[in-house]
Image (spheres, coloured by chain):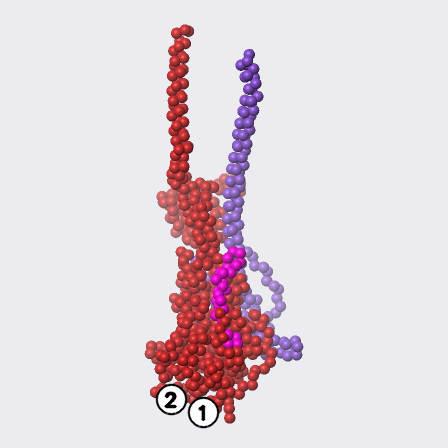
Chain colours: A purple, B red
Amino acid sequence: MRNLNQTRARGPLVMIVVMGFLAISILHLLLTIATSQSVYELSDLKREKRELDTTSQIIAEEVASLSSQQNLLNTAAKLGMVANSNPVFLKLDDQSVLGKPKPALGTASQSRNLVANSAMIDTKPAKQEAVPASQTQPQQLPQVASVNAIPASPTR
Amino acid sequence: MNHAGPVSARRLRLLITISVILVFVFLIRLIDFQVVRAEAINEESYEKRAVARTIPAVRGDILDANGNILATTVYRYDINAAPAIVRPVERKIDGIDQVVSVESVAAELARILDLDVAELLPKLIGTSHYVNLKKRVDAETHRQIVDLEIPWIFADPHQDRLYPNGAVAGNLIGFVGTDGEALAGIERQFNACLAGVDGKETFEKGVDGIKIPSSTVVIQEAKPGRNVILTIDADLQYQAQQVLATEVRRLNADWATAVVIEVKTGRIVLAAEAPSVDPNDPGKSPESERGARAFQFAFEPGSTMKAITAATAIDTGYATVNTPVRAADSMRVFDHVINDSYSHPPTNWTVTGVLRFSSNVGTIKFAERVPAKTRYEYMEAFGFGKPTAVGFEGETRGVLNHYTEWDGVTNYTTMFGQALSVSPVQMASAYQVLANEGVRLNPVLVAGCQDEDGNLTAVPKSNPTQVVSASTANDVMHMLEKIVEQGGIGQATAVAGYRSGGKTGTAEIKEGTGYGQYYAASFYGMAPIDNPKYAMGVMIYKPKKVWTNSMAAAAGYQKILSQVLLANRVPPSTGKSRDLPTEWK
């Protein structure tokens, strides 16, 4: 009887131990699943970062190519703009004119790019002879170039 | 039943005993593996699976004074294939699983990589695990390849250097080799700043040699390189190179340089030359055009040196702007005859007039009383005979022999820029002294090395030195203004609205033991005279299509000066030039 009573008394204790063990196991399982999930998420995020870095590089190269002085000069030449190395100033205090205004003729050669840049590919060659500003008619602003027309940086 | 009982019990005990022994043996073995030798076994196992890899540090950028990127690092990709596992590619097209033949995949690859499919296809056949299809394609191309999802194509990334503005300041920036080694210019001189520290990582690989995903462990993070900030204005540098390239063509010259220095800081705003190397493709330029002549080339300056001689004579009290000189067009010095560049009767010039008409004989007349030792010390103080503080790689010191080595004729010819040589930057720096009230500032090309927080280190010191008095410098500057105001060539350098001063130089070029038939034509000066902002010079080397060599540099000088003044919004000059007579009666 005494043994039977002792066994009965231990019953809840065993149940608690078994339940505790099961709870810990389930918790461990859940944590393992969560960790595994995080590892995959981390991996995905790293891949996404690589992709974004690549996109950033592609865009940065395009921007650098478009904003290079050679590209700007070619674009300006296409629009008929020419450099004028004869600036003229109007002095406001005595309304005098400093310098002789001259049209930017004879500077067409400087409107062509002469500085090499193999990191820039211009899809269309610049006009060989720029039109003086005085001879150009007001014209509609050009449409924004399509993405495909962006000069891309080549490799070397 | 009674007979069977003891036997079964014995067997059971035996079985239990054996089991216990076995468990005990396994337990000991387990403890040995898991506890006693666990670390060693783990290490041995990891070493077999793990692969160590260097994480290359990203090289820093080179930027101009306004933050424009002149050199940066980008990733390029080698596209490779593993022929041993080449097979048709399964793809889902319009929701339907399809198999794309190797030939079709090869055609797609050829189109993206700009290759001939007939050349590419044979590379995909074989038992090799590696064959390169194309080296160093850009990120856009690499992405297109990745999007094809071909399991037997893989890519190796490499760092590469990109110079977005091409040859703009290419001679200064230098370039790096395909292996990433800095080979020239700022790239090499400031390699310690630009290069970072490589990191290290390991990853595990399976039995098949393929990397196990998520097994990468970074042992040491890579430390990126820092940025080098130049004092150059890339836009002005480009415009100057454009002007020089135009002038080189127009004059059928060998090459040309231009240097502009900010008077109050010593910062080099531009150091241009034509032809100039495109660092993206340095192999296209001959070796002679890959350096920076502004720093590395020394030439006999000729008459631009007369301004320095005049400053020396005035500062030492041997002359003033009005000191009278009577000069013929030639004079005998020992067994040599020294001529002026044109015939004229004996003329009564002031020192101003001597500079205005660039008379060699007149220069000797007012400067011969200055001791050679004194003139030598002044030339040294102006910065001749030693490299500038920029310390550009391969920078010339020029030739300035010690005065004790000057023979009788050399003593005189050094007064008008012969028997010595200077670099274009040295001469521009000397004119910076005249424009800055006699105070010399070290020329600066690199503003510093910038870390990721924007802090600048290795900032050069300007080290101000009073070379001549302020009044002497101003006297010379006002004499130089007369050259621009009155001289035929000087007038061609004038920019409307601004008072400027300058001096022509037409130096013979040594060939063998004598002089050749071509010249180094230069013009050095400063502007605006009423508030000097810039000292500058243009040198055209061996112009062959000119009616007078002195004129060769004038047009380029005027165009570059005009751009510099305009781009920096320098207010037009006020006041008039000093009344300085050029002749005396």
Q: Label 2 belongs to which residue?
A: B332
Q: Secondary structure at mark 2?
A: strand
Q: Residue furthest front?
A: A2
Name which residue lies at 45% across and 41% down: B215
Label 1 crowd (10 A; few <14 / some 14-19 / many >=20)? few
Question: Observer-nearest residue: B328 or A51?
Answer: B328
* Magenta part of the chain: B435-462
Q: Does the image show residue A123?
A: no
**1 and 2 marks in contact (CB < 8 Å):** no
Mark-to-mark CA distance, 1 and 2: 14 Å
Classify residue B302 by image quadrant.
bottom left
In the image, residue B214 lies in the stretch drawn in magenta: no
Instruction: Give x and y (percent) for residue A113.
Output: 50, 67
Instruction: Give x and y (percent) for residue B202.
Output: 43, 44
Q: Is residue B40 left or right of residue A138?
A: left
Q: Is residue B404 above or below residue B460?
A: below
- Marks 1/2 same chain: yes
Q: Is residue A88 above or below residue B581?
A: above
In the image, residue B450 lies in the stretch drawn in magenta: yes
Q: Is residue A20 above or below residue B487?
A: above
Instruction: Give x and y (percent) for residue B225.
Output: 47, 56
Q: Is residue B311 left or right of residue B44?
A: right
Magenta residues, dominant SS class? loop
Type of amino acid under label 2: Arg
